[in-house]
Image: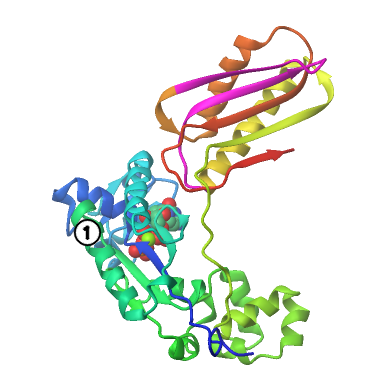
């Protein structure tokens, strides 16, 4: 198949932006005395006995071999004199919203994909030089207004733009012209393809597939036998074909989860356990979307379909199941009237970031 350049149709121009060492850079911006130092954000190292992992670290700390998701005890061994800081999530959510506001101001379709990265479809600019000018301006604006650096990739597809933004980190700007799409991808290790993790990489290695070129040239029937129908999309990506669009999403209003008991109940233990499970679920949805909330709402439907809700807005942003569950229990106590319960639900709202899906999941 031909890569994503069809004669007569202008190739799309997709911009992918990813902030550099995001949490660490925000801390270094807020505290100038940290700049230039190895800074590690994550669990308390507790003099090398700490449990938990590194969330991220400054590029100065990366020079010592420290990486995201590494045990904090190992990071302490690699660089005991690093500055270790606990994460300040509400601060990062605010910085993320500031970055997204700068991106949104240009009026192009925007898709935020994590706390520190987003796609913009800038095809309407018409030419790569115009898109490059915009990328330079975005980098300058983020640096001037927020004191933060980012890396940008410009390419005809989302996948290639994302791969490109990572090539010259930190502070990079990598442009992949449509005619260079295939040669850009070909020598890269397969792991560079978003979605190929350690496990898939190992399976591909076993099959003798190391580079994206190897993947593009491999017998599709053998790939399908091993990976199922998704092998077709995977091989397309390896060949530079990726039609996925930059999907604008409505601002999230709430994240909620509710469950209907198989039999109406007033069993306190069952109600408490269900509330705990609901709190876990909604908090997982929240963290999947990089959100924090302030308002917890409990919904109770009694026998006979009478429904009551009660909400409480906390003074601070939070997103952990313990806080949510404690708050939900207090609210339930306030509205519980002794009747048997048919349905129980928790909703979280008042978010500090604006770009995510509206989600209501039925159990
Ligand atoms: N993060 C985390 N745990 C991970 C990976 C990331 O908590 N295992 C958090 C901290 C990061 C933020 O998400 O600052 C963004 O993730 P990135 O993968 O973009 O990493 P960084 O922005 O920190 O570094 P880079 O410059 O490589 O993008
Ligand atoms: Mg980043």
Mark 1 surroundings within 10 Å by alpha-carbon count, few (fewer than 14), some (14 through 19), many (20 or more): few
State which quarter of the image contains the C terminus: top right
SS under mark 1: helix
Q: Position of residue 72 (x, y in %)?
A: 39, 52
Query: What quarter of the picture does the N terminus occupy?
Result: bottom right
Give the residue drawn at x 46%, y 91%.
183
Q: Position of residue 244 (x, y in %)?
A: 58, 70
Q: Residue furthest left?
A: 33
Question: In terms of image quadrants, where is residue 285?
Answer: top right
The secondary structure making up most of the magenta span is strand
Q: Is residue 237 magenta?
A: no
Residue at coordinates 34% horizontally, 74% vertically from top-left? 131
Asked if residue 193 lies left or right of residue 151, the reply is: right
| Residue 304 appears left or right of 32 | right
81 lies above or below 6 = above
Q: Nearer the viewer, residue 147 or 2?
A: 2
Q: Is residue 67 visible?
A: no
> Which residue was labeled with disc 1?
143
**What is the basis of the colouring in this image?**
rainbow
- Whether residue 197 is visible: yes
Q: Is residue 13 left or right of residue 298?
A: left
Q: Across the whole image, how many numbered discs are drawn on residues?
A: 1
Residue at the (56%, 15%) spot, across then down: 330
Which residue range is magenta in the image? Answer: 289-313
- The percent position of residue 324, horizontal first and vertical second, equals 54, 28
Percent position of residue 101, x then y: 34, 50
Q: Residue at x 49, y 44 (%)?
A: 251
Q: Is residue 82 above or below residue 165?
A: above
């Amino acid at each position: 198949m031909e890569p994503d350049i069809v004669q007569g149709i202008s190739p799309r121009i997709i911009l992918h932006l990813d902030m550099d060492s995001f949490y660490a850079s925000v801390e270094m911006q807020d505290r100038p005395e940290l700049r230039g130092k190895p800074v590690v954000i994550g669990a308390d190292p507790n003099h090398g006995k700490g449990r938990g992992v590194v969330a991220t670290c400054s590029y100065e700390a990366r020079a010592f071999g420290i990486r995201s998701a590494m045990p904090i005890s190992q990071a302490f061994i690699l660089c005991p004199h690093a500055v270790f800081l606990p994460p300040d999530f509400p601060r990062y959510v605010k910085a993320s919203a500031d970055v997204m506001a700068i991106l949104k101001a240009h009026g192009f379709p925007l898709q935020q994909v994590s706390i520190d990265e987003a796609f913009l479809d800038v095809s309407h600019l018409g030419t790569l030089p115009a898109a490059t000018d915009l990328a330079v301006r975005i980098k300058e604006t983020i640096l001037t207004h927020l004191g933060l650096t980012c890396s940008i990739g410009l390419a005809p597809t989302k996948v290639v733009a994302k791969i490109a933004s990572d090539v010259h980190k930190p502070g990079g700007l990598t442009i992949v012209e449509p005619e260079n799409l295939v040669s850009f991808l070909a020598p890269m290790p397969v792991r560079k393809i978003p979605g190929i993790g350690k496990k898939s990489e190992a399976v591909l290695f076993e099959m003798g597939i190391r580079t994206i070129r190897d993947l593009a040239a491999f017998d599709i029937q053998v790939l399908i036998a091993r990976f199922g129908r998704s092998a077709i999309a995977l091989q397309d990506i390896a060949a530079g074909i990726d039609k996925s669009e930059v999907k604008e999403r409505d601002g999230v209003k709430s994240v909620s989860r509710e469950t209907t008991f198989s039999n109406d109940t007033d069993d306190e233990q069952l109600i408490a356990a269900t509330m705990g499970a609901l709190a876990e679920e909604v908090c997982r949805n929240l963290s999947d979307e990089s959100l924090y909330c302030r308002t917890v709402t409990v919904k109770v439907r009694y026998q006979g379909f009478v429904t009551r809700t009660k909400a409480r807005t906390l003074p601070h942003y939070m997103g952990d199941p313990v806080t949510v569950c404690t708050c939900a229990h207090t609210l339930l106590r306030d509205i519980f009237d002794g009747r048997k319960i048919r349905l129980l639900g928790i909703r979280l709202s008042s978010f500090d970031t604006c770009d995510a899906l509206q989600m209501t999941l039925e159990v």
